[in-house]
């Protein structure tokens, strides 16, 4: 009888691997839940480190029996377990415990057991990581909510409108002078850049309790390395930074994050170009991070900074339209520059526009698919040089004199690494 329960096409070894995976998934969720309830909240949990593996096992067995004798067994198992969870919740709610997170995690554990039996192990593992992360980040997420402003809520709504409502309405095709503009493609790039900036801003919000100029620079660089440079330069001159050298740390760290951001944007447009750029950008980013760390060590490790980096929400309709206009202008001017002298025009345009907007010039160069990867990669690196020069001018104009040596050392090392990348590759 028990042999008949085994699906005819499922090998015993494969069945055992899936069974152990289901138990491991349940154990991971149960471990987090029991720790959070018993140790942190000092409460009796709905289920813990023993119960959650059993829940995942119940889902696994329900799927196994359902495959052999019909889906009614799986449905009955799920309905029965859900009814038990609801009954338990109603009893616990009488003691003023209204949270439903733990109970929902139990239902998810059951369904994950079903997914594992269906050999969706990768999907089940990803979902488990997401669930465990959300459960463990309870305190930090609640703190994050308290830091939101009405402008932040409007920014989330606007991003949804920008990405989900506006994009489908825009036509694809060649428009404008020489047919250089594709409105659908342009707005896709707007969503990409806005999403990266908004993600960096949210990360800064979540990590708000971790002060320190090194961390500020790394997180702020995801929003805008130029904004970080200007903010820290002004703060250093105004005497708002405990140690002047720490401003140089933040500026160099923010510039280091620029290179992974460029790689991400290039990957979204042309993966072969991104792979071509990967070793070059990785070299420069490592050098920049190393210099930021050395500058931080020279500042005697005084990481704590009493002032917060002033980062405003980077997303609204005005900013999106502004980037779209800049990107369209860069596309048109780059097309003019490369019409007769492709390589020379590309390099000249990268030097000019890199000083103003690295996002626009990176995306514009990446879309020049008729040019070789080497030419486009060199043009993007030249644009980063121009952007770094512009940021150093901001330091000279708005920063304290003490910034010049530290930032100069960091940017000098970045320039040498960029030159090395240009010569080697």
Image (cartoon, grey):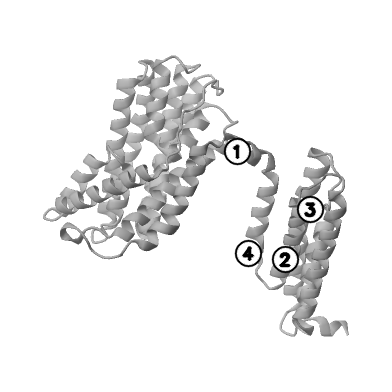
Whether the residues at callouts 3 and 2 have beta carbons within 8 Å, the answer is no
Residue in front for this viewpoint, 365 or 48 = 48
Secondary structure of residue under mark 4: helix
Indicate which disc residue 30 carries. 3
Q: Is residue 276 visible?
A: no
Q: Which residue occupies 53% across, 36% down?
A: 149
Q: Please state if 32 lies on the left or on the right of 145 as rendered.
A: right
Secondary structure of residue under mark 1: helix
> Of marks 1 and 3, which one's residue comes earlier in the chain?
3
Residue corresponding to mark 2 = 111
Q: Which residue occupies 31% across, 40% down?
A: 384
Whether the residues at callouts 1 and 3 have beta carbons within 8 Å, the answer is no
Q: Which residue occupies 27% across, 47% down?
A: 325
Q: Please state if 267 lies on the left or on the right of 77 as rendered.
A: left
From mark 1 to mark 3, how far is it between C-alphas? Answer: 25 Å
The label nearer to you, 3 versus 2, is: 2
Residue corresponding to mark 1 = 144
- Picture quadrant where residue 113 is located: bottom right
| Residue that lies at the very extreme toward the left in this rendered image | 340
> Of marks 3 and 2, which one's residue comes earlier in the chain?
3
Whether the residues at callouts 4 and 2 have beta carbons within 8 Å, the answer is no
Please, is residue 352 above or below residue 114 in the view?
above
From mark 4 to mark 1, how far is it between C-alphas? Answer: 30 Å
Whether the residues at callouts 1 and 2 have beta carbons within 8 Å, the answer is no
Q: Quadrant of the N terminus?
A: bottom right
């Amino acid at each position: 009888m028990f042999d008949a329960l085994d699906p005819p096409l499922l090998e015993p070894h494969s069945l055992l691997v899936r069974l152990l995976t289901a138990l491991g998934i349940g154990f991971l969720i149960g471990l987090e839940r029991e720790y959070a309830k018993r140790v942190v909240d000092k409460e009796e949990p709905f289920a813990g480190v023993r119960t959650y593996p059993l829940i995942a096992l119940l889902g696994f067995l329900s799927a196994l029996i359902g495959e052999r004798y019909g889906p009614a067994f799986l449905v009955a198992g799920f309905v029965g377990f859900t009814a038990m969870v609801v009954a338990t919740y109603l009893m616990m709610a009488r003691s003023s415990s209204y949270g439903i997170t733990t109970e929902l995690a139990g239902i998810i554990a059951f369904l994950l057991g079903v997914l594992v039996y269906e050999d969706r192990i990768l999907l089940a593992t990803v979902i488990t990581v997401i669930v465990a992360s959300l459960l463990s980040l309870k305190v930090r997420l609640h703190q994050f909510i308290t830091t939101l402003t009405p402008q932040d809520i409007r920014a989330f709504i606007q991003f949804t409108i920008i990405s989900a409502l506006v994009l489908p309405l825009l036509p694809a095709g060649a428009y404008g002078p020489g047919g250089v503009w594709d409105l659908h493609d342009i707005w896709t790039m707007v969503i990409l850049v806005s999403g990266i900036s908004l993600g960096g801003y949210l990360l800064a919000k979540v990590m708000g309790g971790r002060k320190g100029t090194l961390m500020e620079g790394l997180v702020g660089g995801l929003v805008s390395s130029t904004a970080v440079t200007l903010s820290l330069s002004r703060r250093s001159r105004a005497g708002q930074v405990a140690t002047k050298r720490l401003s140089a740390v933040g500026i160099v760290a923010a510039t280091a994050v620029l290179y992974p951001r460029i790689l991400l944007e290039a990957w979204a447009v042309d993966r072969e170009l991104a792979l071509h750029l990967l070793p070059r950008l990785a070299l420069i980013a490592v050098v920049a991070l190393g210099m930021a760390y050395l500058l931080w060590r020279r500042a005697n490790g005084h990481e704590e900074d009493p002032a917060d980096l002033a980062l405003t929400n980077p997303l609204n309709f005005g900013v999106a339209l502004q980037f779209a206009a800049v990107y369209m202008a860069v596309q048109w001017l780059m097309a003019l520059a490369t019409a007769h002298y492709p390589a020379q025009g590309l390099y000249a345009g990268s030097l000019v526009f890199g000083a103003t907007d690295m996002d626009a010039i990176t995306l514009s160069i990446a879309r020049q698919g008729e040019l070789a990867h080497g030419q486009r990669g060199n043009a993007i690196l030249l644009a980063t040089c121009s952007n770094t020069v512009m940021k150093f001018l901001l330091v000279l104009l708005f920063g304290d004199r003490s910034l010049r040596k530290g930032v100069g050392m960091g940017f000098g090392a970045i320039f040498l690494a960029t030159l090395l990348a240009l010569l080697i590759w």
